[in-house]
């Protein structure tokens, strides 16, 4: 399966970005943003989600974040309707290799013995974000500083929290098994696959933070997701048990309901741009070219992009590269729209890292 970034999104962006800013002096803003960031160490992101059919890699772990928001802002006050999905898996490469062998029906000459452990942090939900933008109120040096704290409240409809540990073996799809200890909470049991009656919903309360500072020699942007957070889940289904294929008791343990308080993982995004002219005496030739760096910091892995940004009166075009993961990134920013796209290859289905972002803004 090949998946390419939809061409119509590029068309929409360019139609908006090369038009004149609309109602630039308006006081009310409507905005739609859709952002997606995924990284999978064992294989390409879409192949990992497609029953592990693809080329196996040597790295560990995986993380994914998807968020869509439709928001309004008026005189600094902001309110948005948010849908947020987060997946985090700490998985050793030997265990990933076992999944790969099993799903691709590969037979080994010798049985593979591994110590298997995996930790999962998964949640998804919908709700509201309420924030306020503090603008130009921090003195002369920080006259172009904006700070936007936001409170997010999400009604969660899906969770996997916990993991397993034990010893497994594999030689073929007819010869596999072992013993693992389970200790995790969930809305759907993906291991023992036992069904519980009823609907189980929790709440996430989080603090998001945005900072935007512009100066003649440096522009900085920061976005923090769940900088401080709590998940409250009353009666979350949990399993503490042992699964073994080597005893008469395949599943030994118990299922129960527990009131829990959890911390949702935080995500951090940072951008920094400095005019190329501060490093050169020929300032008139480099006024529109900026050094451009950005970072995505997650509990699993951090990514650092470096490159250049070209600015005109209406748009900012950024071209960057992450040397550690060999990933290229392109970004476009306009008063009415923002777009980002990053992938290791143009064929997104073969990339271990994917970044997609689309933002549309209207002032009136």
Image (spheres, grey):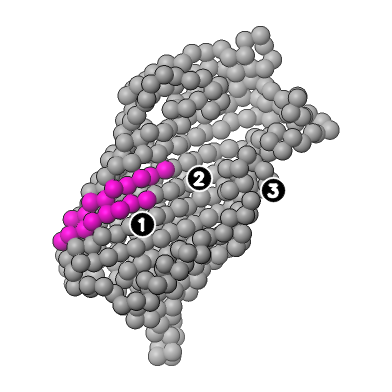
Task: Report which residue position mark 2 lands on.
Answer: 63
| Picture quadrant of residue 362 | bottom left
Look at the image and tell me whether residue 52 can be seen.
yes
Quick one: label 2 or label 1, which is nearer the N terminus? 1
| Picture quadrant of residue 169 | top right
Look at the image and tell me whether residue 305 can be seen.
no
Left or right: residue 326 versus residue 361 is right
Q: Position of residue 82 (x, y in %)?
A: 32, 47
Task: Report which residue position mark 1 lands on.
Answer: 33
Graded by Cα atoms within 10 Å as few (under 14), some (14 to 19) or many (20 or more), the crowding at tag 3 reads few
Name the residue: 43% across, 59% down: 357
Left or right: residue 178 versus residue 25 is right
Left or right: residue 359 versus residue 61 is left
Query: What segment carries the magenta color?
Result: 68-85
When the figure is inspected, residue 297 is found, relative to residue 11, above or below; the finding is above
Front position in the image: 142 or 190: 190
When the figure is inspected, residue 234 is found, relative to residue 293, above or below; the finding is above
Name the residue: 21% across, 58% down: 73
Q: Position of residue 303 (x, y in %)?
A: 50, 56
Residue 305 image label: none
What secondary structure predominates along the stretch shown in magenta? strand
CA separation, marks 1 and 3?
A: 32 Å
CA separation, marks 3 and 2?
A: 18 Å
Residue 55 image label: 3
Quick one: label 3 or label 2, which is nearer the N terminus? 3
Name the residue: 42% across, 72% down: 14
């Amino acid at each position: 399966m090949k998946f390419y970034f939809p061409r119509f999104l590029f068309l929409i962006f360019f139609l908006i970005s090369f038009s004149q800013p609309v109602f630039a002096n308006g006081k009310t803003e409507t905005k739609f943003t859709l952002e997606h960031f995924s990284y999978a160490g064992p294989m390409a992101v879409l192949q990992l989600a497609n029953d592990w059919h693809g080329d196996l890699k040597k790295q560990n772990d995986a993380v994914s974040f998807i968020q869509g928001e439709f928001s309004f802002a008026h005189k600094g006050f902001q309110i948005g309707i948010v849908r947020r999905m987060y997946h985090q898996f700490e998985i050793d490469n030997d265990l990933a290799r076992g999944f790969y062998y099993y799903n691709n029906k590969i037979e080994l000459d010798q049985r593979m013995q591994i110590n298997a452990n995996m930790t999962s942090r998964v949640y998804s939900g919908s709700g509201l974000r309420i924030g306020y933008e503090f603008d130009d109120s921090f003195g002369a040096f920080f006259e172009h500083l904006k700070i936007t704290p936001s409170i997010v409240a999400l009604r969660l409809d899906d969770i996997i929290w916990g993991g397993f540990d034990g010893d497994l073996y594999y030689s073929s799809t007819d010869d596999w098994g072992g013993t693992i200890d389970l200790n995790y909470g969930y809305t759907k049991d993906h291991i023992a696959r036992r069904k519980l009656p009823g609907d189980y919903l929790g709440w996430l309360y989080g603090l998001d933070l945005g900072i935007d500072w512009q100066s003649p020699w440096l522009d900085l942007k920061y976005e923090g997701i769940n900088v401080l957070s709590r998940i409250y889940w009353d009666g979350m289904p949990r399993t503490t048990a042992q699964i073994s294929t080597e005893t008469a008791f395949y599943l030994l343990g118990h299922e129960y309901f527990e009131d829990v308080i959890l911390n949702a993982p935080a995500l951090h995004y940072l951008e920094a741009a400095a005019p190329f002219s501060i490093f050169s005496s020929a300032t008139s030739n480099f006024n529109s070219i900026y050094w451009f760096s950005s970072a995505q910091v997650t509990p699993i892995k951090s990514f650092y992009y470096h490159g250049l940004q070209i600015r005109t009166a209406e748009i900012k075009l950024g071209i960057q590269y992450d040397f550690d993961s060999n990933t290229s990134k392109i970004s476009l920013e306009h008063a009415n729209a923002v777009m980002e796209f990053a992938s290791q290859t143009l064929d997104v289905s073969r990339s271990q890292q994917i970044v997609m972002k689309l933002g549309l803004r209207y002032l009136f």
